[in-house]
Image: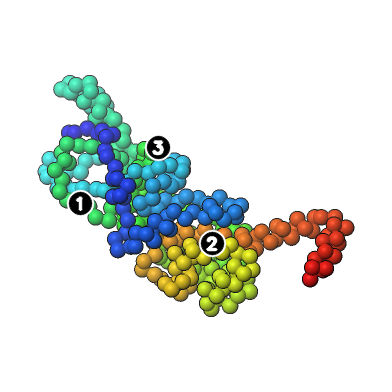
Amino acid sequence: MKLPKTDVQPLSSDAAPVRRGEPRATREELQSWDGADFETGMTEEPIPILGKASFKCPHCRANAHQDWYQLMASLCDENSAPFVPDVDFGRRIKEADSMSVETKQALIDWSDEMQTGGPFLASSENWLHAKIKVGNLWVSRCFSCKKVAVWVHDRLTFPVWNFAVVPNDDLPDEVKGDFIEAAKILDLSPRGSAALLRLCIQKLCKHLGRSGDNLNDDIAALVRDGLDARIQKPLDIVRVVGNNAVHPGQIDLTDDRDTASTLFRLVNIIADAMITQPRQVNLLYQELPESSRHQIEKRDARKG
């Protein structure tokens, strides 16, 4: 039995997984946009996304660099059928007389890794000539804790990731409910999550006094009312506005986890800019002495 080593080589940055047929420039724009230019007063969780160079590790929760690996397959023969050591395996190895100390320790270390019940990476000379590539299956390894995450297509399947994005407290209840529902289904259906979040933006526009019938016009109107004009670019990228806009609530087959994670942030950014910040400014204004408020009102009346 070849023993586990830690010299497994990750994919180069150019070979990191990316969805086939997806415009690469658009994906790079989407992954590079993190909302940092918008001063919303909120911290956004860097959630795991397929192919991204760093994110919050689902194991150790550190925001760390991730190495990506593709998987190769080799047919099992009668001497290499799947085998999981039992809890007594280590003791039997220690008592074996026909093994060197180094071999015993390596087998015990391998058994300990197997007993965790989770996947791990190990190099083996037996796999040097494997010619079968496993499609739609990837693993990432965290630089911080060295633990492995497993991805099927563009979904994180191990470990279970509890997506903890929090809706802005000032969102209307109807919008907040859809937001929370989108978070719950993100791993099961990124497309469904993205569809709900576009619906959130439509409902939020209606709450802010817009028609909700044409999001291009609604967002343009919100920009005239003070929403940062730079938000139009990410909204275009995730197809909320622009020539390729998707109708709110409609499933788009090209949507993925990247798209949904950006939409979560955009909903909160719009709510913060158009609801939270004006409310906070008004509260500060109300805390001013009455004489100061009166002077401000007289000054503004003269300007009018």
What is the x, y in percent for residue 16? 31, 50
Q: Earlier in the sequence, mark 1 or mark 2?
A: 1
Q: Is residue 304 above or below residue 167?
A: below
Q: Quadrant of residue 258?
A: bottom left
Tell me the quadrant of the picture where the C terminus can be found: bottom right
Q: Residue at x 30, y 40 (%)?
A: 120
The amino acid sitting under disc 3 is Cys
Q: Residue at x 56, y 67 (%)?
A: 175
To which quarter of the image does residue 212 belong? bottom right
- Callout 1: SS: strand
Picture quadrant of residue 21? bottom left
Q: Are marks 3 and 1 in contact (CB under 8 Å)?
A: no
Which residue is more in the foreground, 107 or 90? 107
Q: Secondary structure at mark 2?
A: helix
Give the number of the mark in front: 2 or 3: 2
Look at label 1 and name its amino acid. Answer: Lys
On the image, numbered disc 3 is attached to which residue? 145
The residue lying at 59 percent from left, 58 percent from top is 168
Tell me, for residue 259, which label it has, or none: none
Residue 208 horizontal side relative to residue 111, left or right = right
**Place of residue 49 in the rendered image (x, y in percent of width and height, measured from the top left):** 40, 53
Mark 3 / mark 1, whichever is N-terminal: 1
Whole-number angstrom distance, CA of label 1 to CA of label 2: 42 Å
Q: Circles 1 and 2: CB distance less than 8 Å?
A: no
